[in-house]
Structures are given as C-alpha cells and as structure tokens.
Amino acid sequence: MLLLQQYGKKKKPRKNWEQAFRKMHENKDDQLLMDDVFEDETFEEGK
C-alpha cells in the first residue's frame, strides 16, 4: 500500500485489451503461432 502511495495510482496492465484483440481479429492477426498439440505428444497416462 505504501508503494502505491509513493508512486501514484495503480496501473491497469490489461486496460483496452478488448479493443486490441478485436482489432487483431479484424486484421486476422489472431492465428495460433504453433500447434496446440505436438506430433510426438501422447495423452496416455502412466506411460
């Protein structure tokens, strides 16, 4: 709390994210950079 008083208002790091993501989607910049599953990945438990 003391730090906030010394340095002013608390910053909002996610401010305007909704707008930025909407613009990214419109520009088709929201594609995955890599697959969510790798070729050599297995989902069998205990092996």
Image: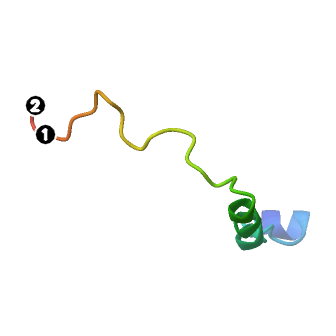
Most foreground residue, 15 or 9: 15
Task: Please provide percent x and percent y for residue 26.
Answer: 73, 65
For label 1, the residue is 44
Q: Are marks 1 and 2 in contact (CB under 8 Å)?
A: yes
Give the distance between the C-alpha atoms of the residues marked 1 and 2, in whole angstroms: 6 Å
Instruction: Tell me the quadrant of the picture where the C terminus can be found.
Output: top left
Query: In the rendering, which numbered label is found on residue 23?
Result: none
For label 2, the residue is 47
The vertical placement of 47 against 35, above or below, is above
One can see residue 19 in this view: yes
Task: Please provide percent x and percent y for residue 3.
Answer: 80, 62
One can see residue 15 in this view: no
Q: Residue at x 41, y 44 (%)?
A: 36
- Which residue is at the far top? 40
Would you say 20 lies left or right of 46 here?
A: right
Tell me which colouring the rendered structure shows: rainbow
Q: In the rendered structure, which amino acid carries the disc numbered 1?
A: Glu
**Mark 2 surroundings within 10 Å by alpha-carbon count, few (fewer than 14), some (14 through 19), many (20 or more):** few
Instruction: Tell me the quadrant of the picture where the N terminus can be found.
Output: bottom right
- Which residue is at the far left? 46
Q: Residue at x 57, y 41 (%)?
A: 33
Q: In the rendered structure, which amino acid carries the disc numbered 2?
A: Lys
Task: Please provide percent x and percent y for residue 25.
Answer: 68, 63
